Amino acid sequence: MPDHYTTLGVDRNATQDQIKKSYRQLALKYHPDKNPGNESAEQSFKDAAEAYEVLRDPQKRARYDQFGEAGVNNGGAPGGGFDFDLSDALRTFMSGFGGMGGIDDLFGGGRRSRRRTARGSDLRVELTLTYEEIATGTEKTIRIKRFEACPTCKGSGAAEDGGLITCPACHGAGEIRQVQRSLLGQIVNVTQCRNCVGAGQVVDKPCRSCHGDGRAKQSRDIKIKVPAGVAAGNYMTLEGEGNRGPRGSAPGDLLVLFEEATHHIFTRHGNSVLLAINITFSEAALGTTIEVPTLEGKAKLKFPPGIQSGHILRMRGKGFPGIKGRGRGDQLVKIQVLSPERVSAAQEKVYRQLQKSESPITGSGRFTRFSE
């Protein structure tokens, strides 16, 4: 395990603000949403979170400075002798920065990180949503493959004529204690027993179906209630919907990461939705009313006479809702006056007459500064 100060790129005299700033930069750089499928980035994300959990706590930091990893290796908090997994790192990320990037805490679904022995691993899935589904909220059913209790042994891992016996490695404690002597006294290092995975018991005669693991792969349909207003990069944690732990131990969680499907006419910008609309010369000059598509149907929009190409009209409250119903964005409609590529003889005659009746654009009035 690398030194926590080295992991965060700060010196040992760094202030809490410096530690938090450095962690934030690393967390944003290596966040799984920005590095899908990149195991190296995911590990860096977890390492940074683990280091931050230790150094942001004055008591843990003091013990770490004095005793190193052994000073915080007590089986309690992150950095304490157990694997610091992705769900822990994500919760550190959310709790450290007010739910940044996630929606668990905003919906009251966040929880404090707690350590479990023999806990099953977490699963992560991506769920792509349409703009319309995001605008109203939706319920989705997804199919996942996960470890569940073995149907033969009901999750015990033991054969019918077998059973559980006390783990010979830890003698039923579920953990291994190692005492190290130093100039400062005895340091007790507590780690989870690898032989029984923290259970304190092992199988005497293993089940033939699962070979003593107590688990088997199963396909399962999971219903997900997606609240309105989520965005790409948000995620939800479904507790207990991950892989079952070995021999009947607790399951992990299911992390659902949201993605947005590309819309054929709309573009999202925060809680606002953007749309361009083409109108003719006559509609621009005389004004008109057009039925405009929105996220939840159609609405009439009035165009005033003399509207110019590039002008933006605002349709209030027609954008995306805020998370937990906190306000609603607008729909912004950009005007594009469409010039016909071909004109008929009759149309050309009309345009010639219009050209003669128009006031000519002269001097500096014809030229303006270019802007995107």
Image (tube, rainbow, N blue to C red):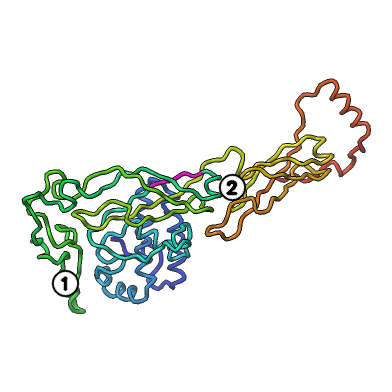
Q: In the displayed structure, would residue 354 be above or below residue 52? A: above
Residue 173's spot in the image, x, y percent?
14, 67
Q: Which comes sooner in the sequence, label 2 or label 1?
A: 1
The span from disc 2 to disc 1 (Cα, nearest Å) is 58 Å
Label 1 belongs to which residue? 180
Q: At x 77% / y 32%, what residue is drawn?
A: 339
Q: Is residue 126 magenta?
A: yes
Direction from residue 163 to residue 315 in the image, left or right? right
Label 2 belongs to which residue? 268
Circle 1 Cα neighbour tier, 10 Å, few/some/many (<14 / 14–19 / ≥20): few
Q: In the displayed structure, would residue 50 be above or below residue 338? A: below
Main SS of the magenta part reads strand
Q: At x 19% / y 74%, what residue is drawn?
A: 187
The segment highlighted magenta reads 125-129
Residue nearest the viewer, comparing 82 with 261: 261
Q: Amino acid at mark 2?
A: Arg
Residue 330's spot in the image, x, y percent?
65, 52
Q: At x 84% / y 25%, what residue is drawn?
A: 347
Which quadrant would residue 334 be assigned to in this image?
top right
Direction from residue 70 to residue 312 in the image, left or right? right
Direction from residue 308 to residue 234 in the image, left or right? left
Tell us which disc is closer to us: 2 or 1: 2
Helix, strand or loop at label 1? It is: strand
Q: Farthest residue to the bottom: give it.
A: 184
Q: Is residue 366 magenta?
A: no
Q: Amino acid at mark 1?
A: Gln
Which quadrant would residue 338 be assigned to in this image?
top right
Residue 167's spot in the image, x, y percent?
10, 61
Q: Which mark is residue 208?
A: none
Residue nearest the viewer, comparing 53 with 15: 53
